[in-house]
Image: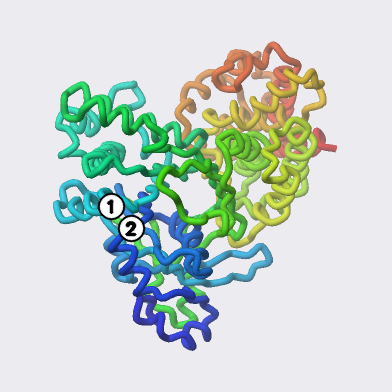
Amino acid sequence: MKMNAASLQDKAGWQAVNVTLPAFDHAAMTAATKEHPIWVHFGAGNIFRGFIAALQQKLLNQGLSDKGIIAADTFDYDIIDKIYTPFDNLTMMVTLNPDGTTSREIIGSVAEGLRANSADAEMMARFKEIFTDPGLQMISFTITEKGYALYRPDGSLMPVVQADMDEGPAHARHAMSMVAALLFERFNAGKYPLAVVSMDNCSHNGEKLQSSVMTVAKAWAEKGYVGQDFIDYLSDESKISFPWSMIDKITPRPHKIVEEALAADGIEDMAPIVTGKNTFIAAFVNAERPQYLVIEDKFPNGRPALEKAGVYMTDRDTVNKTERMKVTTCLNPLHTAMSVYGCMLGYTLICDEMKDADIVALIKRLGYQEGLPVVVDPKILDPKAFIDEVVEQRLPNPFMPDAPQRIATDTSQKVGIRFGETIKSYIATGRDLNSLVSIPLALAGWLRYLLAVDDNGEAFEVSADPLKDDLQAKLAGIEVGKPETYKGQLKEILSNASIFGVDLTTTPLAEKVENYFVAELAGPGAVRKTLHDALQ
């Protein structure tokens, strides 16, 4: 079996290998979409193929739409050339169920795959054709938070962005410049309305996208490339909107078990490739079943009936509350706490950590006892049910090859949101900070992890973090196995409100963190013993 448009006619063949096919006319959808597109998506990777494209497939299957999506990649053109084009833009979606079974479906809602390459005149002509169609309703993005960045870490503009600003819309290369240039084409064609929707997994994503597009456009206005009327058009929400969203679904890299199962059933060409930009990708996507997408319902030119596909269409405040619920209480704090301890206790898979009674006790207390009393309740999702699903289905899923080492990356940038917000809520509501155990344990565990010595006394590699060198320098002199080498080195770190969201030395938590940290220095097995004893 080869996955392509022609093979969709072989219904019996695909049924024999347990693959569900699109329930609509793929050729008709492709023709209708190309002629008058309604939706373009930038960022053609796994979260798009395995989640967002599957949403539109549901609408097509139900007869609620006759059009699909045009996918574009702004960064890695090999994805289009090697993963989209050879398979007629089809994706084999393999859902990894918590019980160890899988389900397979061919996603056929993508009508066209484009390289967003400003050096390719033919491609850019096609983009202009799409963006000047009055019926285009939305463009969306999963390009990661880095995709919106215009500035380098030192605060200066990236050279490519500076060049784009200097040379004007005709030469745009950076993704944000390209979007601004295409919106300028739409403006010139008739000031047509459009929703510009970030679906990336970052807080206030619509605001980040809007800020970057506006920064480029205003630079062009200052240099005379565009008029103030274009800036007014971008600033008018009845014309151009930038809805916020919250997305949650784990789509890890292609799993060997899935690849082998597809090959065993005679489905060809499913082996992953590594692109020129080092993306590890395959014609299949494997992902967990749970998924959430909450979008601010602000679409000035209409939109697909996404609520009929399971998307929560709501207001900005609710999007923000849902994001806070996930990031500060129900998922991300649990991930961070178990990742730093998992690294020290020798784990390489999150699912294996969920067989460890001490780690499970840590995250259950963190979520249910310490987080839920102050959780931000968005009303559209039940916070307790969300944690139940995380603890009982998502984290233990043996098919989800996620590693604590990956999740421990950039922890210094995360602890302020993932733990600091709960601490601030306790202070604001007059709750007893002495009742917290999992939060100070998680913070002590992270600082102990930075010593780069595991619970057996063996050295290991600490994951990348922009503050790693600075923090490790402050911990200098502390030796695992010699608690007496602790001379208060944590105090300077714990007083840093820019890391934790609050100066912990003004609270009882600093002493608690120090006590747990020193206990974890005692020698081999001390991390385990401290974790176990504290949670009893």
Q: Residue at x 51, y 38 (%)?
A: 409
Residue 317 in the image: state x and y as whole percent: 59, 33
Dot placed on the residue nearer the N-terminal end, 2 or 1: 2
For the point 59% across and 62% down, the residue is: 399
Please tell me how crowded label 1 is: few (under 14), some (14-19), or many (20+) other residues with Cα within 10 Å: some
What residue does disc 2 label?
37
**Is any part of residue 455 visible from this angle?**
no
Question: From the viewer's perspective, is residue 304 above or below residue 431?
Answer: below
Residue 378, x across and y down, in percent: 67, 38
Identity, as a three-letter code, of the amino acid under mark 2? Pro
> 495 above or below 516?
above
Graded by Cα atoms within 10 Å as few (under 14), some (14 to 19) or many (20 or more), the crowding at tag 2 reads many
Tell me the SS state at disc 1.
Answer: loop
Q: CA distance from mark 2 to mark 1?
A: 7 Å
Using the rendered image of the protein, determine whether residue 519 is visible from the camera's viewpoint.
yes
Left or right of 69? Residue 160 is left
Report the side of 527 relative to 65 (left or right).
right
Q: Nearer the viewer, residue 194 or 394?
A: 194
Q: Are marks 2 and 1 in contact (CB under 8 Å)?
A: yes
Report which quarter residue 500 is drawn in.
top right
Give percent across and percent down for residue 45: 40, 55
Mark 1 — residue?
A: 133
Question: How many numbered marks are there?
Answer: 2
Which of the image's four quarters has the N terminus? bottom left
Give, as a three-letter code, the residue at label 1.
Asp
Residue 415, label in figure: none
Query: Which residue is situated farthest in the right direction here?
Result: 536
Locate the C terminus and report the quarter of the image it occupies.
top right
| Residue farthest toward the top in the current orientation of the protein | 506
Q: Which residue is outermost to the bottom?
A: 12
